[in-house]
Image (spheres, rainbow, N blue to C red):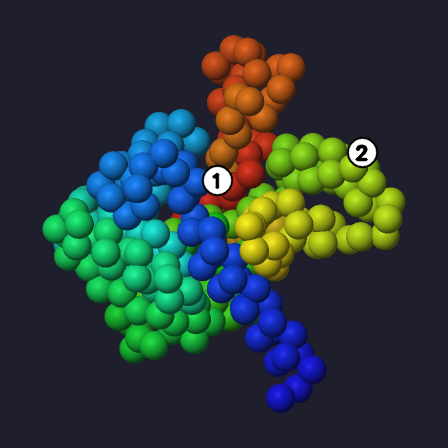
Amino acid sequence: MSERDVALKEEKQRAREQWAQDPCGEFYGREYEFGTREFFDRVERHRYEEYAPWMPEVMGFNDFKGARLLEIGCGMGTDLLQFARGGAKVTGADLTPRSVEISRARFRLYEMPGEFVITDGERLPFADKSFDVVYSNGVLHHTPGTDVAVAEAHRVLKPGGTAKVMLYHRNSLAYWGELFFRRGILGGELLRGRSMQEVMSKWVEISNADARPLVKVYSQREARTLFRMFREVKTEVEQITRPELRLFKNIPESLFLRLRRTLGWNVIITARK
Protein backbone atom coordinates (compact mmCIF):
# COMPACT_ATOMS: atom_id res chain seq x y z
CA MET A 1 0.00 0.00 0.00
CA SER A 2 1.40 3.40 -0.99
CA GLU A 3 1.99 6.23 1.49
CA ARG A 4 -0.95 8.13 -0.04
CA ASP A 5 -3.25 5.11 0.29
CA VAL A 6 -2.29 4.75 3.96
CA ALA A 7 -3.06 8.44 4.56
CA LEU A 8 -6.45 8.14 2.84
CA LYS A 9 -7.30 5.06 4.88
CA GLU A 10 -6.45 6.93 8.09
CA GLU A 11 -8.65 9.89 7.07
CA LYS A 12 -11.63 7.62 6.52
CA GLN A 13 -11.02 5.75 9.76
CA ARG A 14 -11.10 9.07 11.65
CA ALA A 15 -14.44 9.82 9.98
CA ARG A 16 -15.82 6.43 11.06
CA GLU A 17 -14.66 7.07 14.64
CA GLN A 18 -16.23 10.54 14.64
CA TRP A 19 -19.69 9.49 13.53
CA ALA A 20 -19.75 6.17 15.37
CA GLN A 21 -19.09 8.01 18.63
CA ASP A 22 -21.19 11.10 17.89
CA PRO A 23 -23.98 10.47 15.35
CA CYS A 24 -24.96 13.74 13.71
CA GLY A 25 -27.73 15.40 15.75
CA GLU A 26 -27.63 12.95 18.67
CA PHE A 27 -26.73 15.73 21.14
CA TYR A 28 -30.03 17.55 20.57
CA GLY A 29 -32.17 14.57 21.58
CA ARG A 30 -30.16 13.75 24.69
CA GLU A 31 -33.03 14.50 27.11
CA TYR A 32 -34.78 11.37 25.82
CA GLU A 33 -33.77 7.74 25.62
CA PHE A 34 -31.66 7.18 22.51
CA GLY A 35 -33.55 5.55 19.65
CA THR A 36 -37.06 6.32 20.91
CA ARG A 37 -39.66 8.24 18.91
CA GLU A 38 -39.33 11.10 21.41
CA PHE A 39 -35.57 11.20 20.81
CA PHE A 40 -35.86 11.32 17.02
CA ASP A 41 -38.72 13.85 17.12
CA ARG A 42 -36.60 16.18 19.26
CA VAL A 43 -33.65 15.84 16.85
CA GLU A 44 -35.98 16.80 13.98
CA ARG A 45 -37.43 19.80 15.80
CA HIS A 46 -33.97 21.16 16.47
CA ARG A 47 -32.78 20.65 12.90
CA TYR A 48 -35.77 22.08 11.03
CA GLU A 49 -37.25 24.57 13.51
CA GLU A 50 -34.31 25.91 15.51
CA TYR A 51 -31.10 25.37 13.54
CA ALA A 52 -32.04 25.44 9.85
CA PRO A 53 -35.72 26.29 9.24
CA TRP A 54 -34.83 27.01 5.59
CA MET A 55 -33.81 23.41 4.94
CA PRO A 56 -37.11 21.65 4.05
CA GLU A 57 -37.84 24.12 1.25
CA VAL A 58 -34.30 24.61 -0.07
CA MET A 59 -33.46 20.90 -0.01
CA GLY A 60 -36.84 20.03 -1.51
CA PHE A 61 -37.99 17.30 0.82
CA ASN A 62 -41.39 17.20 -0.90
CA ASP A 63 -40.14 17.69 -4.47
CA PHE A 64 -39.21 14.13 -5.43
CA LYS A 65 -42.33 12.01 -5.07
CA GLY A 66 -41.87 8.69 -6.87
CA ALA A 67 -38.17 9.33 -7.56
CA ARG A 68 -35.37 6.93 -6.64
CA LEU A 69 -33.24 8.95 -4.21
CA LEU A 70 -29.82 8.07 -2.79
CA GLU A 71 -28.36 9.88 0.21
CA ILE A 72 -24.58 9.66 0.50
CA GLY A 73 -23.80 9.87 4.22
CA CYS A 74 -27.25 9.32 5.68
CA GLY A 75 -26.13 9.57 9.32
CA MET A 76 -29.12 8.89 11.60
CA GLY A 77 -31.49 9.14 8.62
CA THR A 78 -32.97 12.50 9.63
CA ASP A 79 -33.08 14.10 6.17
CA LEU A 80 -33.65 10.80 4.40
CA LEU A 81 -36.83 10.26 6.42
CA GLN A 82 -38.16 13.62 5.21
CA PHE A 83 -37.62 12.63 1.57
CA ALA A 84 -39.37 9.30 2.26
CA ARG A 85 -42.31 11.14 3.81
CA GLY A 86 -42.39 13.27 0.65
CA GLY A 87 -42.87 10.12 -1.42
CA ALA A 88 -39.34 9.40 -2.66
CA LYS A 89 -38.08 5.80 -2.85
CA VAL A 90 -35.01 6.19 -0.67
CA THR A 91 -31.66 4.48 -0.24
CA GLY A 92 -29.30 5.54 2.54
CA ALA A 93 -25.55 4.96 2.21
CA ASP A 94 -22.99 5.57 4.93
CA LEU A 95 -19.37 4.71 5.69
CA THR A 96 -20.18 4.06 9.35
CA PRO A 97 -21.95 0.79 10.26
CA ARG A 98 -23.54 2.36 13.34
CA SER A 99 -25.14 5.10 11.24
CA VAL A 100 -26.72 2.53 8.94
CA GLU A 101 -27.94 0.54 11.96
CA ILE A 102 -29.54 3.66 13.51
CA SER A 103 -31.14 4.76 10.24
CA ARG A 104 -32.59 1.34 9.58
CA ALA A 105 -34.04 1.18 13.12
CA ARG A 106 -35.46 4.70 12.75
CA PHE A 107 -37.28 3.82 9.53
CA ARG A 108 -38.72 0.70 11.18
CA LEU A 109 -39.88 2.80 14.14
CA TYR A 110 -41.75 5.19 11.84
CA GLU A 111 -42.92 2.35 9.57
CA MET A 112 -41.34 3.93 6.49
CA PRO A 113 -39.75 1.98 3.61
CA GLY A 114 -36.07 2.45 2.86
CA GLU A 115 -32.95 0.58 1.82
CA PHE A 116 -29.56 0.98 3.48
CA VAL A 117 -25.99 0.06 2.63
CA ILE A 118 -22.60 0.47 4.29
CA THR A 119 -20.32 1.90 1.63
CA ASP A 120 -17.73 4.51 0.73
CA GLY A 121 -19.09 7.51 -1.19
CA GLU A 122 -16.01 7.35 -3.42
CA ARG A 123 -16.88 3.78 -4.51
CA LEU A 124 -20.64 3.41 -4.70
CA PRO A 125 -21.88 -0.17 -5.28
CA PHE A 126 -24.62 0.87 -7.70
CA ALA A 127 -24.92 0.55 -11.46
CA ASP A 128 -24.67 3.54 -13.77
CA LYS A 129 -27.89 5.57 -14.09
CA SER A 130 -29.54 3.99 -11.05
CA PHE A 131 -31.05 7.05 -9.34
CA ASP A 132 -33.16 10.10 -10.15
CA VAL A 133 -31.69 12.10 -7.24
CA VAL A 134 -28.44 11.99 -5.29
CA TYR A 135 -28.44 13.96 -2.04
CA SER A 136 -25.60 14.62 0.39
CA ASN A 137 -25.62 17.14 3.22
CA GLY A 138 -22.41 18.03 5.05
CA VAL A 139 -20.58 14.86 4.08
CA LEU A 140 -18.48 15.16 0.92
CA HIS A 141 -16.19 17.81 2.44
CA HIS A 142 -15.03 15.11 4.89
CA THR A 143 -13.88 12.59 2.27
CA PRO A 144 -10.35 12.86 0.82
CA GLY A 145 -11.52 12.44 -2.77
CA THR A 146 -14.41 14.90 -2.86
CA ASP A 147 -14.02 15.16 -6.63
CA VAL A 148 -14.16 11.35 -6.89
CA ALA A 149 -17.37 11.27 -4.82
CA VAL A 150 -18.94 13.93 -7.06
CA ALA A 151 -17.98 11.87 -10.11
CA GLU A 152 -19.62 8.83 -8.50
CA ALA A 153 -22.80 10.83 -7.86
CA HIS A 154 -22.78 11.84 -11.54
CA ARG A 155 -22.24 8.22 -12.62
CA VAL A 156 -25.16 6.74 -10.67
CA LEU A 157 -27.58 9.51 -11.72
CA LYS A 158 -29.90 9.01 -14.64
CA PRO A 159 -29.69 11.56 -17.49
CA GLY A 160 -31.68 14.58 -16.34
CA GLY A 161 -31.24 13.53 -12.71
CA THR A 162 -30.49 15.97 -9.89
CA ALA A 163 -27.63 16.14 -7.41
CA LYS A 164 -28.33 18.18 -4.26
CA VAL A 165 -25.19 18.62 -2.15
CA MET A 166 -24.20 20.82 0.78
CA LEU A 167 -20.54 21.68 1.38
CA TYR A 168 -19.03 24.05 3.92
CA HIS A 169 -18.63 27.61 2.62
CA ARG A 170 -15.20 29.20 2.58
CA ASN A 171 -16.49 32.80 2.31
CA SER A 172 -18.60 32.53 5.44
CA LEU A 173 -18.85 34.20 8.82
CA ALA A 174 -18.14 30.83 10.44
CA TYR A 175 -14.88 30.35 8.53
CA TRP A 176 -13.44 33.86 8.83
CA GLY A 177 -15.03 34.93 12.11
CA GLU A 178 -15.18 31.81 14.27
CA LEU A 179 -12.42 29.64 12.82
CA PHE A 180 -9.81 32.05 11.43
CA PHE A 181 -10.16 35.01 13.81
CA ARG A 182 -11.53 33.58 17.08
CA ARG A 183 -9.84 30.16 17.03
CA GLY A 184 -6.88 30.85 14.79
CA ILE A 185 -5.81 34.33 15.88
CA LEU A 186 -7.33 35.05 19.30
CA GLY A 187 -7.07 31.40 20.33
CA GLY A 188 -3.49 31.23 19.11
CA GLU A 189 -3.93 28.13 16.92
CA LEU A 190 -2.39 29.73 13.82
CA LEU A 191 0.28 31.49 15.87
CA ARG A 192 1.39 28.08 17.15
CA GLY A 193 2.00 26.98 13.57
CA ARG A 194 -1.22 25.07 12.94
CA SER A 195 -2.81 25.28 9.51
CA MET A 196 -6.43 26.26 8.87
CA GLN A 197 -6.96 22.62 7.91
CA GLU A 198 -5.88 21.60 11.41
CA VAL A 199 -7.98 24.33 13.03
CA MET A 200 -11.08 23.13 11.17
CA SER A 201 -10.36 19.50 12.00
CA LYS A 202 -10.20 20.39 15.69
CA TRP A 203 -13.08 22.85 16.02
CA VAL A 204 -15.68 22.12 13.33
CA GLU A 205 -16.62 18.55 14.24
CA ILE A 206 -15.90 18.35 17.97
CA SER A 207 -16.04 14.70 19.06
CA ASN A 208 -15.99 12.79 22.32
CA ALA A 209 -13.55 10.47 20.56
CA ASP A 210 -11.31 13.39 19.52
CA ALA A 211 -11.28 11.84 16.04
CA ARG A 212 -10.51 15.13 14.23
CA PRO A 213 -11.77 14.15 10.76
CA LEU A 214 -10.79 15.87 7.56
CA VAL A 215 -12.76 19.10 6.93
CA LYS A 216 -12.68 21.14 3.72
CA VAL A 217 -14.35 24.39 2.63
CA TYR A 218 -15.37 25.67 -0.81
CA SER A 219 -16.28 29.01 -2.31
CA GLN A 220 -19.27 29.08 -4.64
CA ARG A 221 -16.89 29.28 -7.60
CA GLU A 222 -14.89 26.29 -6.35
CA ALA A 223 -18.11 24.35 -5.84
CA ARG A 224 -19.26 25.07 -9.40
CA THR A 225 -15.87 23.90 -10.69
CA LEU A 226 -16.18 20.71 -8.66
CA PHE A 227 -19.51 19.95 -10.39
CA ARG A 228 -18.43 21.02 -13.87
CA MET A 229 -19.22 17.60 -15.37
CA PHE A 230 -22.93 18.37 -14.87
CA ARG A 231 -24.74 20.33 -17.58
CA GLU A 232 -26.48 22.73 -15.17
CA VAL A 233 -25.05 23.90 -11.85
CA LYS A 234 -26.61 26.37 -9.41
CA THR A 235 -25.22 27.40 -6.03
CA GLU A 236 -26.79 29.23 -3.12
CA VAL A 237 -25.64 30.09 0.40
CA GLU A 238 -27.49 29.50 3.66
CA GLN A 239 -27.12 28.94 7.40
CA ILE A 240 -26.44 31.49 10.09
CA THR A 241 -28.23 31.50 13.43
CA ARG A 242 -28.82 34.72 15.33
CA PRO A 243 -26.69 33.67 18.34
CA GLU A 244 -23.69 33.45 15.97
CA LEU A 245 -24.02 37.21 15.40
CA ARG A 246 -23.38 37.80 19.12
CA LEU A 247 -23.74 41.58 19.76
CA PHE A 248 -25.63 41.99 16.49
CA LYS A 249 -28.13 39.15 16.95
CA ASN A 250 -31.11 41.52 17.12
CA ILE A 251 -30.61 43.05 13.67
CA PRO A 252 -33.74 43.41 11.47
CA GLU A 253 -34.99 40.25 9.78
CA SER A 254 -34.32 41.62 6.27
CA LEU A 255 -30.64 42.22 7.09
CA PHE A 256 -30.37 38.86 8.86
CA LEU A 257 -31.67 37.06 5.75
CA ARG A 258 -29.20 38.94 3.55
CA LEU A 259 -26.30 37.92 5.78
CA ARG A 260 -27.54 34.33 5.93
CA ARG A 261 -27.65 34.11 2.15
CA THR A 262 -24.23 35.65 1.56
CA LEU A 263 -22.09 34.72 4.60
CA GLY A 264 -23.78 31.47 5.62
CA TRP A 265 -21.82 28.32 6.51
CA ASN A 266 -23.43 26.16 3.82
CA VAL A 267 -23.02 26.35 0.07
CA ILE A 268 -25.78 24.28 -1.53
CA ILE A 269 -25.21 22.92 -5.02
CA THR A 270 -28.09 21.88 -7.26
CA ALA A 271 -26.70 20.16 -10.34
CA ARG A 272 -28.57 18.60 -13.27
CA LYS A 273 -26.96 15.78 -15.23
Quadrant for the C terminus in the image: bottom left
Kindly identify the residue that appears in the image at 52 percent across and 50 percent down. 167
Kindly identify the residue that appears in the image at 55 percent across and 50 percent down. 208
Tag 2 residue: 186
Q: Earlier in the sequence, mark 1 or mark 2?
A: 2
Task: Judge by depth and name the residue closer to the eye, 214 or 151.
Answer: 214
Task: Judge by depth and name the residue closer to the eye, 69 or 197.
Answer: 197
Amino acid type of the residue that numbered disc 1 sits on in the rendered structure: Glu
Residue 228 percent across, percent down from the top left: 51, 61
Kindly identify the residue that appears in the image at 40 percent across and 59 percent down. 73
Q: Horizontally, is 185 left or right of 20 in the view?
A: right
Task: Judge by depth and name the residue closer to the eye, 41 or 175.
Answer: 41
Mark 1 and mark 2: span between their CA atoms? 30 Å
Quadrant for the N terminus in the image: bottom right
Residue 150 percent across, percent down from the top left: 47, 64
Residue 58 visible in the picture: no
Query: Callout 1: helix, strand or loop?
Result: strand
Q: Is residue 51 above or below residue 107?
A: above
Residue 211 percent across, percent down from the top left: 59, 58
Q: Are marks 1 and 2 in contact (CB under 8 Å)?
A: no
Tag 1 residue: 236
